[in-house]
Image (tube, helix red, strand yellow):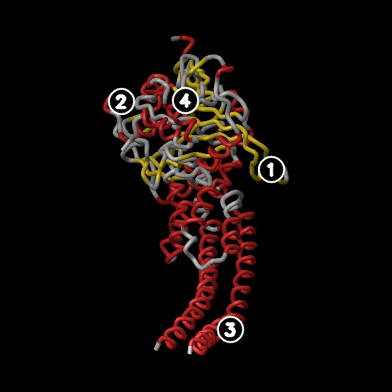
């Protein structure tokens, strides 16, 4: 009985790890999707950021939505006086519970240093570069999933079995 | 609902960094009421000015005539202010930056000065902004009282009017009050009120915010907010059947062409131009089409006896109807 529990627990742990990787991939994809919506607001609508971010947050869900709302509110309330400060704060708080890895969050943060700081044509170029960088992270995440998921799942179960065998 | 002028300065202070805002708020009420401009200059003393008043502000919110004691504006102050003025989005004020100023909520004009990025001899954008001038827009009800009598032709008709004024002499304030009076009517002048289409290119006259005018521009006024003048005039003629077109600061050939179209369509025109005399108006080549036979009244402004001083009123043939020197 105890052995079965150990095997199950280890197996579950393995599944958790692989789910985290899938989560990361989905979050990156979502982020890119909503950034594209933000780009439309910026380059076509010339909508100022507090309103643009709020508009997007209504369409987004979960962490991405909270991320945008956090920035929009902190600017409107004058808690921060520059976009950079608000952006970094939101990245450190709203995205802390996400499955995004440190390199992903650093990438998101760096975008905050140029957002809103130049004319439409220039902003468009920065957005395009950001998509390329995000896509790069997404591809790396997908690779990692393929490589690791099978490994984690089977490793989990194997470990369980090994412990069981040792104990018995 | 029109906003009280005491609140107007608070609207502008919202665009300044917190510590500077607090410094200025500490000034006495009468001083605050008299402030027309707040200036930020990189590395130089913080300065406020108004009619007959120029003060430097110290770090603890006291006014002083001694520049040496004043708070010196830092690079961060200007960066924060610029972010607030642009609403954290430079791209949203691209067109305005090309003209050197941004209009913020409430109709206040914020002039900016720095390094211009030019392309083919035209201003593309501005960066390294080291100088900012916050001009507080105030509505003065009654600003047009002294002059409106000359502009009314009959209970339901006015003369095509051009207001000629140097900067900071109350031209926009006059235009705003004139629009209000001509729209809502004036019992004192037995004037019924006419339908006015206001083309508020810089959002300064009506100061619309989310579609609601912050200033009272009259009950029969339709406001086209943020629209280039020439196009706006044509749009309004076609859609809103105005009896009067009101707009500020004409200067381009297209503006003159649009005014001719308005006059030919039977619409009266009230507008303004930068200059200190009729001569300045007649020298502008781009406006040659409207220099004869269009305007029936000219009002010249100055600051001689304070903002909004009426120097002269002339008719269409440049005969003096009022001259400040012969009062």
Q: Is mark 4 on a helix, strand or loop?
A: strand
Q: How far apart are marks 4 and 2 (CA)?
A: 31 Å
**Above/below status of A11 relative to B222:** below
The verdict on a common chain for dots 4 and 1 is yes
Q: Mark 4 lies on which chain?
A: B
Residue at the image position 42 percent from the left and 20 percent from the top: B31
Q: Nearer the viewer, mark 3 or mark 4?
A: 3
Q: Name the residue under label 2.
A: B189
Image coords of residue B42 (percent x, y): 62, 30
Q: Distance between the residues labelled 3 and 4?
A: 71 Å
Q: Name the residue under label 4.
A: B36
Q: Which of B218 and A74 is in front in this view?
A: A74
The verdict on a common chain for dots 3 and 1 is no
Q: Can residue B280 be seen in this view?
A: yes
Residue at the image position 58 percent from the left and 78 percent from the top: A145
Q: Mark 2 lies on which chain?
A: B
Left or right: A91 as drawn, with respect to B198? right
Q: Mark 3 points at which residue?
A: A151
Locate the C terminus of chain B by quadrant: top left
């Amino acid at each position: 009985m105890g052995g079965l529990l150990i095997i199950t627990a280890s197996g579950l742990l393995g599944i958790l790890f692989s789910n985290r990787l899938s989560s990361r991939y989905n979050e990156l994809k979502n982020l890119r999707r909503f950034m594209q919506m933000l780009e439309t607001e910026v380059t076509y609508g010339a909508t100022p950021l507090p309103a643009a971010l709020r508009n997007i947050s209504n369409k987004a869900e979960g962490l991405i939505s909270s991320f945008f709302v956090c920035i929009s509110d902190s600017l409107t309330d004058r808690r921060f006086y520059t976009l950079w400060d608000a952006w970094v704060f939101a990245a450190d708080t709203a995205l802390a519970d996400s499955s995004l890895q440190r390199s992903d969050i650093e990438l998101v943060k760096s975008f905050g240093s140029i957002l809103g700081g130049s004319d439409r044509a220039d902003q468009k170029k920065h957005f395009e570069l950001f998509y390329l960088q995000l896509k790069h992270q997404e591809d790396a995440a997908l690779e990692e999933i393929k490589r690791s998921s099978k490994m984690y799942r089977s490793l989990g179960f194997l470990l369980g079995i090994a412990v069981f065998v040792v104990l018995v | 609902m029109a906003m009280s002028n005491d609140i107007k300065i608070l609207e502008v202070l919202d665009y300044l960094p917190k510590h500077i805002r607090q410094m200025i708020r500490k000034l006495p009420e009468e001083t605050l009421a008299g402030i027309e401009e707040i200036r930020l200059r990189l590395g130089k003393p913080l300065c406020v000015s108004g009619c007959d008043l120029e003060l430097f502000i110290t770090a603890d919110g006291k006014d002083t005539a001694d520049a040496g004691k004043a708070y010196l504006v830092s690079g961060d102050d200007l960066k924060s202010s610029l972010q607030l003025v642009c609403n954290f989005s430079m791209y949203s004020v691209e067109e305005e930056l090309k003209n050197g100023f941004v209009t913020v909520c409430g109709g206040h004009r914020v002039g900016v000065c720095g390094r211009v990025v030019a392309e083919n001899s035209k201003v593309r954008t501005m960066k390294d902004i080291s100088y900012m001038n916050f001009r507080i827009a105030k509505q003065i009800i009654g600003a047009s009282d002294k002059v409106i009598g000359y502009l009314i032709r009959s209970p339901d008709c006015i003369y095509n009017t051009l207001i000629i004024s140097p900067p900071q002499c109350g031209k926009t304030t006059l235009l705003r009050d004139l629009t209000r009076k001509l729209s809502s009517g004036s019992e004192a002048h037995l004037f019924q009120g006419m339908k006015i289409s206001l083309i508020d290119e810089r959002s300064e006259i009506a100061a619309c915010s989310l579609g609601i005018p912050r200033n009272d521009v009259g009950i029969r006024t339709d406001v086209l907010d943020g629209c280039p003048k020439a196009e706006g005039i044509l749009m309004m003629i076609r859609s809103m059947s105005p009896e009067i077109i009101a707009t500020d600061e004409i200067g381009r050939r297209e503006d003159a062409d649009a005014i001719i179209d308005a006059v030919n369509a039977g619409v009266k025109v009230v507008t303004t131009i930068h200059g200190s005399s009729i001569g300045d108006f007649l020298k502008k080549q781009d406006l040659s089409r409207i220099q004869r036979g269009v305007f029936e009244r000219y009002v010249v402004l100055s600051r001689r006896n304070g903002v909004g001083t009426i120097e002269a009123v002339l008719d269409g043939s440049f005969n003096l109807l009022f001259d400040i020197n012969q009062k």
